[in-house]
Image: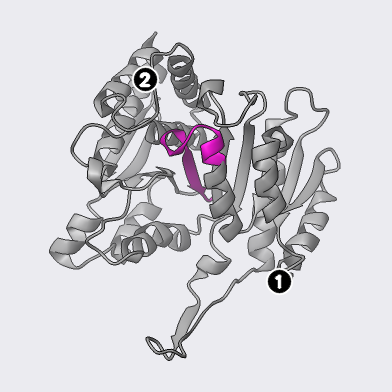
């Protein structure tokens, strides 16, 4: 019996509709080749909807999504609307209301020509960052005192719970176990990235990491403070295998990692609750200046489709999509990841063609 997956699509703003269209084109090709189907429901939420209705994303939409298996997001953000308003209501809304506690960010270099680092190739850049996705400074606990005066005070709380910390750390160890050792290594490794020497609340991470690690004696562990981790990401990216980190630091280091793998045009992420509906997206912004020009690079969205399929259990299809993109880059058929180097629809067609070979 053919498997059918219920998927919500959320184009959002700017180039979102164009890159999502190409992602769905590749999804359709994968369905034909691998014998599964998706039942897609388009959601209108984003800048245009907000400007017309004053509505960001209603509770009814979140309730509907809970009954589905995945969400595929294009991009959110529009300069006509207050900074953060849509992002917090829609992206953070999905993360918090659906309890998507894992922000999974693979950092994998597909070809040495994409890496800005000297003498680094695919064998040195192959890691996964597990970013906690529902706590820390993004929990929404903030305020202002004497706003718009010379004596204004602003505060924002970093919140960590034992439950939230343990479940993301445990996810990282399970992922390392599943991935197995990197080539040349004798065991998988999980690295804790924090700043517990200065942000003392993160001692909770230190203690929890040690306790969970004791349950996985077959997995090596390491530790780096966030400033040192950023340095090592540039100097010796091969040092990383699986890393786990609080929300704020994960936001920073994964964008650094995206540049090491070739830039925002190839980087995707998953917002995951294992066994439940999860959301997948490219990590780039909405790039309003490219809207409607057929210049945006959709590869990050297509990689997000691959992540979504892996989450749904269609691992062969997911691997084939990644392999198809890697092959196009390695053969020189994809000349650049920069916007305008290829037409948006051209790149989607190229990946579909490579899949069918």
Nearest to N terminus: mark 1 or mark 2: 1
Image quadrant holding the N terminus, namely: top left
Give above or below for 71 relative to 182.
Answer: below
Q: Residue at x 28, y 29 (%)?
A: 340
Quarter residue 354 falls in: top left
The residue carrying mark 1 is 201
Give the crowd class for mark 2: few <14, some 14-19, many >=20 residues within 10 Å.
many
**What is the span of residues highlighted in magenta in the rendered image?**
257-273
Question: Which residue is nearer to you in this view: 309 or 264?
Answer: 264
Image quadrant holding the C terminus, namely: top left
Give above or below for 306 relative to 325.
Answer: below
Query: Is 261 situated left or right of 308 in this image?
Result: right
Q: Tell me, yes or no, if residue 171 can be seen here.
A: no
Quarter residue 38 falls in: top left
Give how far across and how far down residue 114 sits, in percent. 50, 26
Give how far across and how far down residue 308 sits, in percent. 45, 37
Q: Residue at x 36, y 23 (%)?
A: 31
Find numbered disc 2 in the image and state the secondary structure of the residue it sits on: helix
Q: Is residue 262 magenta?
A: yes
The residue carrying mark 2 is 351
Query: Is 98 situated left or right of 217 in this image?
Result: left
């Amino acid at each position: 019996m053919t498997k059918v997956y219920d998927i919500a699509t959320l184009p959002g703003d700017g180039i979102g509709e164009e890159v999502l269209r190409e992602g769905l084109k590749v999804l359709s090709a994968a369905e034909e080749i691998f014998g599964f189907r998706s039942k897609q429901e388009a959601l209108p939420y984003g800048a245009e909807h907000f400007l017309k209705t004053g509505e960001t994303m209603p509770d009814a939409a979140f309730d509907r999504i809970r009954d589905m298996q995945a969400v595929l997001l294009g991009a959110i953000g529009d300069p006509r609307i207050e900074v953060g308003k849509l992002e917090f209501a829609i992206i953070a809304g999905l993360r918090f209301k659906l309890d998507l506690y894992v922000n999974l960010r693979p950092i994998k270099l597909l070809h040495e020509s994409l890496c800005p680092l000297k003498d680094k190739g695919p064998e040195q850049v192959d890691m996964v960052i597990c970013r906690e996705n529902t706590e820390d400074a993004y929990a929404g606990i903030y305020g202002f005192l004497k706003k718009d005066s010379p004596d204004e005070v602003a505060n924002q709380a970093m919140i960590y719970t034992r439950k939230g910390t343990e479940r993301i750390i445990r996810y990282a160890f399970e992922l390392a176990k599943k991935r197995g050792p990197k080539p040349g290594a004798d065991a998988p490794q999980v690295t804790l990235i924090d700043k517990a020497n200065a942000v003392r609340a993160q001692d909770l991470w230190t203690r929890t990491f040690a306790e969970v690690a004791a349950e996985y004696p077959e997995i090596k562990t390491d530790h780096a403070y966030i400033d040192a981790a950023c340095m090592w990401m540039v100097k010796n990216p091969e040092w990383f295998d699986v890393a786990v980190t609080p929300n704020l630091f994960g936001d920073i280091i994964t964008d650094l990692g995206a540049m090491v793998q070739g830039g925002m045009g190839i980087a995707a992420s998953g917002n995951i609750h294992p066994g439940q509906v999860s959301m997948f997206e490219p990590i780039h912004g909405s790039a309003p200046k490219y809207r409607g020009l057929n210049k945006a690079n959709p590869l990050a969205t297509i990689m997000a489709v691959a992540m979504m399929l892996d989450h749904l259990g269609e691992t062969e299809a997911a691997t084939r999509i990644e392999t198809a993109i890697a092959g196009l880059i390695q053969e020189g058929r994809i000349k650049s990841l920069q916007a305008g180097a290829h037409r948006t629809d051209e790149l989607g067609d190229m990946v579909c063609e490579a899949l069918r070979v």
